[in-house]
Amino acid sequence: MSTEARKPPAQIALKIRRILGGKTGWNGVAVQFAFAAVLGWIAYEIVSNTRANLENQHIAAGFGFLRNNAGFDVNQTLISYTGSDTFLRVFVVGLLNTLVVSVVGIFFATVIGFVIALCRLSPNWLLSRIGELYVEVIRNLPLLFQILFWYLAVLAALPNPRQSISLLGIAFVSNRGLVIPRPIGEGGFEAFLAVLAFGIVAALALRFYSRRALFQRGQVIRIWPYVLGLLFGLPLVTMALFGLPFSFEVPQLKGFNFAGGSRIIPEFVALTLALSTYTAAFIAEIVRAGILSVHKGQMEAGSSLGLSRGTTLRLIVVPQAMRVIVPPLTNQYLNLTKNSSLAVAIGYPDLVSVFAGTSLSQTGQAIEIIAMTMGVYLLISLLTSAIMSVYGWRVSRSLGA
Amino acid sequence: MKRVTLALTLALAAGLTAQAADAQTLKTVKDRGAVSCGVSQGLPGFSSPDDKGNWTGLDVDLCRAVAAAVFNDPTKVKFVPLSAKDRFTALQSGEVDVLSRNTTWTISRDTSLGANFTGVTYYDGQGFMVKKSLKVNSALELNSASVCVQTGTTTEQNLADYFKANNMKYEVIAFGTNDETVKAYEAGRCDVFTTDQSGLYANRLKLANPNDHMVLPEIISKEPLGPMVRHGDDQWFDIVKWTLFALVTTEELGITSKNVDEKAKLENPELKRVLGSDGNFGEQLGLTKDWVVRITKAVGNYGEVFDRNVGAGSPLGIARGLNNLWNKGGLQYAPPIR
C-alpha cells in the first residue's frame, strides 16, 4: 500500500487566519482590519485636531523648545549643567537624578527587606516581633508623610553650616548635607586604576575556577587569601612604587557654605531613606512568603546534613524561594521608581520636578513635556521588567523548573 | 502634584478636541452663574482663604470686581487654588476664566501660552529675605548662599541671571508650593528666600518670629503682576481689562464705595459717562450701563482695594510706591472711559 506524502497545508496563510480571525476565518480578519482602521482614524483625528486647536489658540507646539536655554539652575547634577544649557540637558539632568535615587533606593530596599524578612522568620521572639512591628508600621503610613517626616527630621536634627558636625576634620554634616573630601587624580592614578582593574578581573577568574573545581571534581580550593592579595595588596604595592594615586580636596567653610569637596544633599538622603524603608516593608513580606513557600522538609534536610540554619537558608532555601520572590519583587522595584516622583514635595530635583515642573511652566508646553515624561517612566519600567524577567528566567532554569 | 498636572493635561487635550472654537466665555460664565477664578494656594494680601473659607486679597478682589460687573454680585466667584506650575494649564483647559494669581507679565507667557495679560494689578520686583542673624545688608554679599525658591516662577530664572551677572555662586533648592518653600527656609535648609517683594512681606507674616527676618533692599527684576485670560475671546478680554481700568479710573475721579451714589447724581459730564448715565459703554462690553457703579459698590476703587489688602490698612503695610496713580508719582494709569 503506497501512500503519497500528504501535502502540508499552506501554513503561513493558516497561521495568519488563526491569529487575526480566530474561528471565524477570513471574515474575522476583515473585521479586525476594519477595527484597526477605525482605531487609526480616531488616533489621527485626536492628534490632528489637537494640533489644529493649539495652532488656533497660538499655543506653541512641537519639540523645538528643547533647544532653548533653560535659564534656571539645579542643585544636584550628575553631569555638568549651568543655567545657560538647554531644556534637553535639563531633561537629562532630571532623568539621571531620578535614576540615581531609584538605583540607590532599590539597593537599600532589597537589603533592608531581606534582613527584615529573616528577622520575622527568626525563631528568636524579640527579632521576629521587631520585624513584624517594622512591616506593620511602615507599610501602613502614606509614603508622602514618610518623605516629609524624614526630610524635616533630618533638617531639624542637623545644625547650620557654621556649627556643622566635623568628622575627623575632613567631612562635615550640616543641614546643607554631607560634605566629603573629593579625590583628585595625581601622577600614579592611571597605574593604580589599571592594577585595581587587573585585581578585580583576576579575583573573578579565580572564583570561577574554584567553583568549577568544586562542582566538577568536588575539590575545595581556598581562594580568599589570594583574592585579598589581589584586591588590596597589589594596589598598596603600586601606591608604594608610584606614590599616592590621588589627593583629597578637603571642604572648607567659606561664607555661608562649604566650598570644595563633594556634597550629598539632604533632599537626596531623605528621599532615599523614605523610599527604601517604605519599599523594604513590602519586600520583606514578599521574601517571607517566598521562603515559606519552600517546603519545610528542605530546612530539615539541611539540618540533618549538619548545616547551620544560616547556611541552609543561603544554599538551599533562598535559591528555591527566589523563583516565587522575583515577579512581585519586580513590582516593588517599579513602584519605588515611580514613587520617586514624590521628590517634588521636598525639593529634590528629579525628572518630574525639573522637567515636568519647572520646564513645563517656563515653556508652557504641557502636552509635549508630559508625554516625554510619561514615555521615560514607561521606558524605565519596561527595562526594569525586562532585566528582572531575564533574572527570573535564569533562576528558574538553574532550578531545572 | 504630578497627578494634578497630568489630569489638567488630559483635560486640556480633551477640551481642545471637544470644544474647538468655543470662545463664548461671557455666555459660559452666565450659564454657570459664577466666574471661575484661578488664585494662589494662599498668599496673604493677594489671595488667601480665611478660617471660614472666604477668599480675600488684591487678586481676589479683581475677580470679585469682574463678578460684580457681570452679575452685580461679588460673591458669584468660584475660586480655584492653583500652584505656580499648574496655573497656565488650568487657564488653557478652560478650568478657570480668569487667572488672577500674582503672575508676572513676560513676552513668552503672553505669546506662547495661548493667553493674554489684561493689564497690571501690581508693579512688583524680586527681592531677597534673610535671617537678621546672618548680618547681611546687601544681596551682593550672598556669595555661596543656599536659596529657597518656588518652582515654575520667573523668580527662578531671575535668580540665575542675577548671581551669574554678579559672578556669585549659589545653591538653589526649588519646591513645588509656596508653603513648602517657606517651611524649608524656616527650617534652615537655606540662607535666603526669594520671591516677589510683596510676597516676601506677605510670607514674613507666616514665620514664627517675623522680626528675626529682614528683606534686603535690592530689587533685581521687574515683575508686573496681572490677570490673564484665554486667547481668542476678545469680548471677555475687554471685560477683564476694563474692569481693572474702571478700578483705576474711579480712584482718579475720587469715586469710592461710599460716595458712588452721590457722585452718580452730579451733573459732571465725565462722572456721568463713567457711571453710566451718559453713553452705553457698558452695553458695548456686553454688560450693563451701570457696570462701573456695580464694581465700585462691590470692591471700591483701586486705592481702596490696595489699602485693604496690602497697603496701610492691612498687616502687610506696603507703601503705594510704583502702584500709586500716574499723577501721584506711580505707574497706575487707565485709558479714558469715553
Image (spheres, coloured by chain):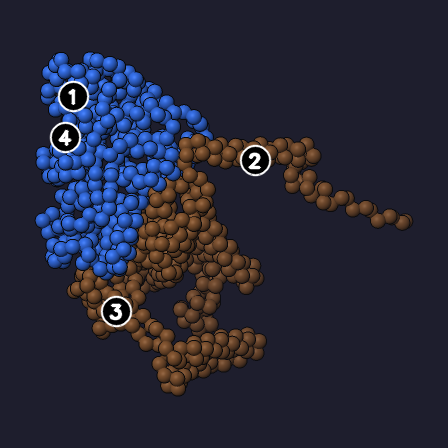
Q: Earlier in the sequence, mark 3 or mark 2?
A: 2
Q: Along the horizontal axis of the image, is B105 left or right of A95?
A: left
Q: Which residue is mark 1?
A: B297
Q: Residue at x 35, y 31 (%)?
A: B230
Q: Are marks 2 and 4 on the same chain?
A: no
Corner quadrant of residue A399: bottom right
Q: Which chain is brown?
A: A
Gap in angstroms between the C-alphas marked 4 and 1: 14 Å
Chain letter of disc 3 in the image: A
Q: Which residue is mark 4?
A: B303
Q: Along the horizontal axis of the image, is B264 left or right of A63?
A: left
Of tags 2 and 4, which is closer to the observer? 4
Q: Residue at x 16, y 64 (%)?
A: A163
Q: Nearer the viewer, residue A254 or A105?
A: A254
Chain letter of disc 4 in the image: B
Q: Which residue is mark 2?
A: A40
Of tags 2 and 1, which is closer to the observer? 1
Q: Nearer the viewer, residue A112 or A182?
A: A182
Kind of residue sitting beneath label 4: Gly
